[in-house]
Amino acid sequence: MKNKILFLATFLLIFGSYTNAQSDGLSFGIRGGFDMQTFNGKDHNGDQLKISMVPRFNVGVVVDIPVAPDFYFQPGLLFTTKGAKSQDQFLGLDMSAEYNVSYIELPLSLLYKPVLGNGRLLLGFGPYLAYGIGGKVKYEINNVSSEEDIVYGNEYSSVIANDLKYFKALDFGANLFFGYQLSSGISMQVNTQLGLAKINADNTLITNGKTELKNTGFGLSLGYSF
């Protein structure tokens, strides 16, 4: 509950500030993109996870607030999906699990947007905050599939060392992107994201476990400013 209140308060503060902004050059935009996402981290024994990337997407709105010539503060509000896919063998069984985790995300970027040709160059970086709102884990054992909901919470109790359907709701990290905006307002950008928060919940029955998952990914997005 405290995390929800903090996230909502941050959202209201940021978006309340720019709805009252009167600066010339203020612009709003919509954005959507395709990402390749995975989890970076370690398993229960501290070994590097054998996890592959999966395609995911994001969509939302951003606003460019002028702070200096060619420099802007760019907050946004996005719906994003993240995840990964793991594959393993156990007792002769082929096993896989695909994670699809949904977030409401608040990127807070410093944007350098100088004129270049008939448009503008886009160079941006900054932190992001995200809050989990749903998701699924799809399991497959010898071609037999099943599906479970993601469960959000800071802790859980299980005799399974890596029961990775339990996630912490709060995520944060860093964004870096570059691209180009045409004079028509249409833009394209390449972005990468590095999660800094441990997103897997702690297993209270196995206190010496070293499992640690962090979101990471990169992608391409299109936008339109008006």
Image (tube, grey):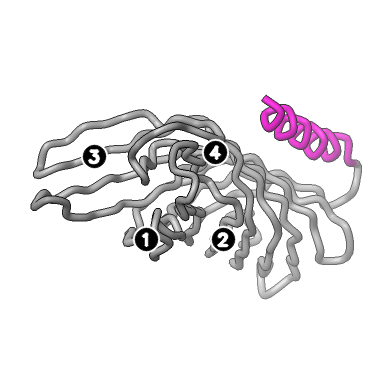
Q: Which percent across, then down, holds residue 160?
A: 33, 40
Point out the tag, 1 or 3, that comes first from the N-terminus: 1
Residue 168, numbered circle: 4
- Mark 2–mark 4 Cα distance, whole angstroms, equals 17 Å
Residue annotated with mark 1: 49
Say what amino acid the circle numbered 3 marks: Tyr
What residue is drawn where x is 35% and y is 37%?
159
Magenta stretch: dominant secondary structure: helix
Q: Residue at point 21% right, 32% down?
A: 146
In this view, the mark in front (1 or 2)? 1
Give me the C-alpha separation between circle 4 and circle 1.
Answer: 19 Å
Among numbered discs 1 and 2, the one appearing first in the sequence: 1
Residue 139 is labelled as 3
The secondary element bearing badge 3 is classed as strand
Residue 151's place in the image compared with 184, above or below, is above
At mark 1, the secondary structure is loop
Provide the secondary structure element on which disc 2 rests.
strand
**Which is nearer the N-term, disc 3 or disc 2?**
3
**Is 9 inside the magenta-drawn segment?**
yes
Q: What segment carries the magenta color?
A: 1-21
Q: CA separation, marks 3 and 2? A: 26 Å
The amino acid pointed to by label 1 is: Leu
Q: Is residue 124 left or right of residue 154?
A: right
